[in-house]
Amino acid sequence: MKTVYCKSGLVRLFSVAVLFMIAPLHSIACDLCGANIGVLPFDNQNSFGITHRYRVFNGYATQNQQSQFFPTGAYRLPANGNYSPLHGGMDHSGNAMAATDYESYKVIEGRLRYFIAPRIEVNLIVPFVNNKQNALGEKAAVFGLGDIIFYSSYHLIQKQLNEVFRHRLVAGIGIKLPTGSDNVHYDNDDDRLPLMIQPGTGSVDGLGIVSYSCAWEGWRAGATVTAKVNGQNKYKEQILPSESTTLMVAYQYEKGNCYILPQLQVYQEYTRGMMSYKYLVPGTGMNMIMAGPGIDVIWKKFDFNFGFQAPVYQEVFEMNMKAAGRIMLGVSYNIESKKYICN
């Protein structure tokens, strides 16, 4: 059944309510992409870089539809001018629960890491997001600044280059600031976009991070666990506490100034979902494990990385679309720490 557009009627109210129910909080889960993983040549150096992530959900489980990684319109920015880049856009074509429906989440992040002391690093992540949704016969898209993340980590165990088995343990705390808008509306409309499509959550959230990594001969392995406690925004919406884990196993090849690390990556995340006025919104939870190949290529002071992950387990709620997978790619430049603010 096609969703009928009615600005002030019950049909429109129903369609927006269902949009909240069918989309888990894919873009809201904390994703530091293993920022502390690995015993690598530039582990204890300052760095800055750019990271890009793309994640897509497509194919309704109840319809036995196959998931596509690049459904039409999910990745590219709209070319027809229907969507305003900062205010959201919408059209009303298509069929409900169609195989062409999707939810896509793209982000480009600027990342900065700086060691203020030999064991203390501070990190800043500034994201720009492009979230898109084509569901129940309606389309929506936004582009803008997301929620900035700041966190600091302490190196409890540091690597020793002269040891055969090297390892380290890092723990940190951080904060996610409500710099991304949570008040984007449909064009020429008083209705607000669903929270999962908004560039930001509108809440101040706290982060806790623990990372362990080790190296033996050419082998590298690491795990990073991130927990997030979320505040409530002005619309009385609150994401329940969430946690995510990133695992990596790699083997390092060396050739001159170049290091190549093919690897296996595993990503897990969980949250019960979103509360609205103290009620849990059905279908907004996330319980998933993804895995896939990745590679780091380190040349001189540059680190190029790429990863692709597909779901190996996911809990799909009724009427939800399935995860098709995600890709991550980035580049960073590393600078040796010669002076510290704190000793």
Image (spheres, helix red, strand yellow):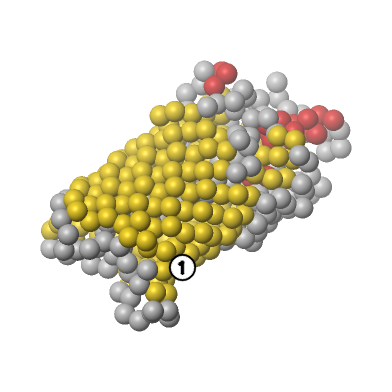
Residue 304, x across and y down, in percent: 31, 57
Q: Which residue lies furthest to the right in this view?
A: 8
Residue 101 is drawn in which quadrant? top right
Q: Which residue lies furthest to the front in this view?
A: 156
Of 327 and 292, nearer the camera is: 292
Q: Identify which residue is drawn at 52% across, 18% down.
A: 64
Left or right of 277 on screen, residue 269: left
Residue 159, x across and y down, in percent: 26, 61
- Disc 1 is placed on an element classified as strand
Left or right of 259 on screen, residue 10: right
Check the picture and name the quadrant holding the N terminus. top right
Residue 93, x across and y down, in percent: 67, 32
Q: Identify which residue is drawn at 81% across, 47% down.
A: 190
Q: Can residue 287 be seen in this view?
A: yes
Residue 119 is drawn in which quadrant? bottom left
Question: Label 1, on which residue?
Answer: 122
Image vertical order of residue 95 relative to residue 176, above or below: above
Q: Identify which residue is drawn at 79% across, 44% down.
A: 191
